[in-house]
Image: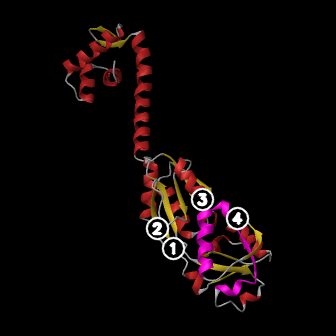
Amino acid sequence: MDFRQLRYFVAIVEEGSLSAASRKVHIAQPALTRQLHTLEDALQVSLFERHTRGMTLTVTGRALYEDARKMLEERVRVMARIRALGQGLTGKVTLGVTVSHLWVPDIRRVLARFRDRYPQVALEVYPLLSGPQSEKLKDGTIDAGFLYLEERVPDHLHSRLFHRDHLVLAVPAGSPLVASPPARVRALNELDFVWGPRHTSPHYYDRLSAYFTRLGLVPRVVQQGADNITILSLVAAGLGISIVPGDCRWSSPPGVHFIDMDELRECDMSIHVAWSRHNPSPALQNFIDTVLDEPRG
């Protein structure tokens, strides 16, 4: 018994005769009759009572008709579901985004565009620092991420530049630096800094430390925050100043003033989109395609 035979059988029942059913399923009547006999032989039952005025269903025929309709309908649903999954129209994409970039317009736009294109794909977004994102991309916990990357991208990742950014100085809104911003970064050496611990994102920490060293800055750290959102909250509270990516403006609490400095502008803090080379998910590929063809400001 196969689905084709079941489809022929249902057509015979619903059309009421072999001749009408043969026209519906586009098969010659003798061939349709042979398929019906083959089905009855396989089941070892008679599905129809044949008489001079036509055919009527037997008890077993009526039972098969109900089940056959359900099986054929379920077959259509299964085929559609698997086809959609294979085309990335359904499924799930897990995404990491650096904490400071959840509110960046470029990222918000691409998430909205993906939702419009693929409304049946579940999109799970996790706020993660770049270090943890890289680890989770490697072990497959997340599918893709927006993060800071080293100059040498790990072998297990594909990546593309997504959004350019640079460093800015963040000070309390009431700081004297608002009215008289420093011309050089080294002028900040005597001021209290709010900074993050290295273990939360080693690449980010080391990159900024190396750049500060070249500029003659050794931050006097008096307070630590786990991420840039926390750091800016402490700056707003007046506990010190900090240097953060410019995109932190989008997620900053009230009470923080940002100052652009030529020396800080030269430190590239661009965000990349990265995903595993070994992840075959069609839904993920559709997400990456959406990211790469999205016009950005």
Image spot of residue 230 (x, y percent):
73, 67
* Label 4 vs 2, first from the N-terminus: 2
The magenta-colored residue range is 185-214
The residue identified by callout 3 is 131
Of the numbered discs 1 and 4, the one sitting upstream in the chain is 1
Distance Cα–Cα, label 4 vs label 2:
26 Å
Q: Name the residue located 44 percent from the left edge and 66 percent from the top edge.
A: 294
What whole-number distance in Å separates the C-alpha atoms at marks 1 and 4? Answer: 24 Å
Question: What percent of the width, then of the height, locates residue 291?
Answer: 46, 62
Q: CA distance from mark 2 to mark 1?
A: 8 Å
Q: Which mark is residue 164?
A: 1
Residue at point 70% right, 64% down?
Answer: 197
Q: Is residue 87 visible?
A: yes
| Tag 4–tag 2 contact (CB < 8 Å) | no
Badge 2 crowding class, 10 Å Cα cut-off, few under 14, some 14 to 19, many 20 or more, is: some
For the residues bearing labels 2 and 1, Cβ distance under 8 angstroms: yes
Q: Nearer the viewer, residue 127 or 91?
A: 127
Instruction: Give 165 or 197, whichever is nearer the viewer.
Output: 197
Q: Quadrant of the N terminus?
A: top left
Q: CB atoms at circles 3 and 2 under 8 Å apart?
A: no
What SS does tag 1 mark? loop
Q: Give the foreground label among 3 and 2.
A: 3
Pointer 4: what residue?
Answer: 197
Q: Nearer the viewer, mark 3 or mark 1?
A: 3
Coordinates of residue 284 in the picture (x, y in percent) = 46, 51
Res. 113 in view: no
Residue 135 in magenta stretch = no
Q: Secondary structure at mark 2?
A: strand
Tag 1: amino acid: Arg
